[in-house]
Image: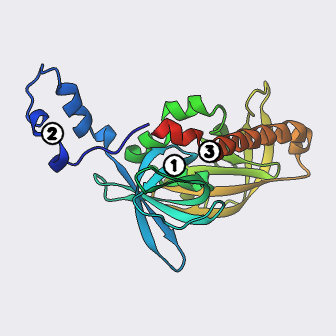
Amino acid sequence: MFFRKKRDSETDSSTRDLKPGHPNQRRQYRVRSPAAAPLRASLERERSAPVVGDCVDISIGGTWVDFARDPRISKDELCTLVVRSEEQPDSIRATSRVVTVAPRDDGGVRVGFEFTNRIELYAQLDEFYARYFNRRRHVRAVPDFELKIPVRLGWRSGSFPTIARDISEGGLGILVPLDKAKELERIDVVDLVFRLPGQRADIECRATIRSRSVFSKTCLLGLEFDPDGPIRGHLLALRRCVEKHQAACKAWKARMAKGQGSRRAS
């Protein structure tokens, strides 16, 4: 969790030039620490001008944004958030859904957003932004919300390990580096070996590459299981995994809707 820091012009001059060992030195460090750099979020919608606010809490599942004025947005409305740090030229675009809208005592509005395409979000994260979206605190607060299934992807002339970020009864969504994606340019069918959370045995099956979405550093592959292959013997375990993950997501959304995240961020 992090909070909006004061700009240099707003910082108390008595703590601006502290020497090492001064009792208030830690306060100065917090103000200038790169890890505490504020994130701004620009709300983008069709036929509306962008509205910029401050991220008060953020994770891979969603974010709370404080707006100085009412953005006139409603619960369940779909939009795009562009998250950017003042220290970074790049930004993160996140397809989002409004979970809750709450007025603030100062006249502003706090809006809770759910990121609806987390695998697309992962594809954009670099070392700078990953520290915000993959914090341990969120993992502890929302058990099993983040899905990470190690997968070995193979074909006739090669193989490599990767991570599945999305799973359904019909297939997997995986991110691969661009150099690996290039090796797969002429490959349509791949062999998979992966293990579902809580299971003791690996699943070995075949899948077809149905989609390829190229980002700046990675490629998102949409894989469809061969419905007549070995995956048929694992459908029950697969269904349970998907249902458990969906239940965790639903519980998180319920907490967001009740404003629990707002109280944590205040």
Under circle 3, the secondary element is: helix
Task: Return the mark for residue 76.
Answer: none
Lower sequence index among marks 1 and 3: 1
Foreground: disc 2 or disc 1:
2
Q: Nearer the viewer, residue 247 or 13?
A: 13
Task: Return the mark for residue 63.
Answer: 1
Q: Residue at x 67, y 59 (%)?
A: 187
> What is the quadrant of the C terminus in the image?
top left
Real-space Cα separation, disc 2 to disc 1, in angstroms: 29 Å
Say which quarter of the image contains residue 222: bottom right
Q: Residue at x 37, y 45 (%)?
A: 128
- Tell me the kind of residue under disc 2: Asp
Left or right: 79, with 248 as reference point: left
Task: Return the mark for residue 12.
Answer: 2
Left or right: 99, with 42 as reference point: right
Q: Which residue is mark 3?
A: 256
Lower sequence index among marks 2 and 1: 2
Question: Considering only vertical position in the picture, is 179 above or below 132?
Answer: below
Q: Around disc 2, counting alpha carbons within 10 Å, would you say few (fewer than 14), some (14 to 19), or many (20 or more)? A: few
- Tell me the kind of residue under disc 1: Thr
Under circle 1, the secondary element is: strand
Where is residue 35 drawn, in percent x and y? 33, 38
Lower sequence index among marks 3 and 2: 2
Real-space Cα separation, disc 1 to disc 3, in angstroms: 10 Å
- Tell me the kind of residue under disc 3: Met
Q: Residue at x 75, y 34 (%)?
A: 196
Foreground: disc 1 or disc 3:
3
Q: Is any part of residue 156 visible from this angle?
A: no
Left or right: 115, with 125 as reference point: right
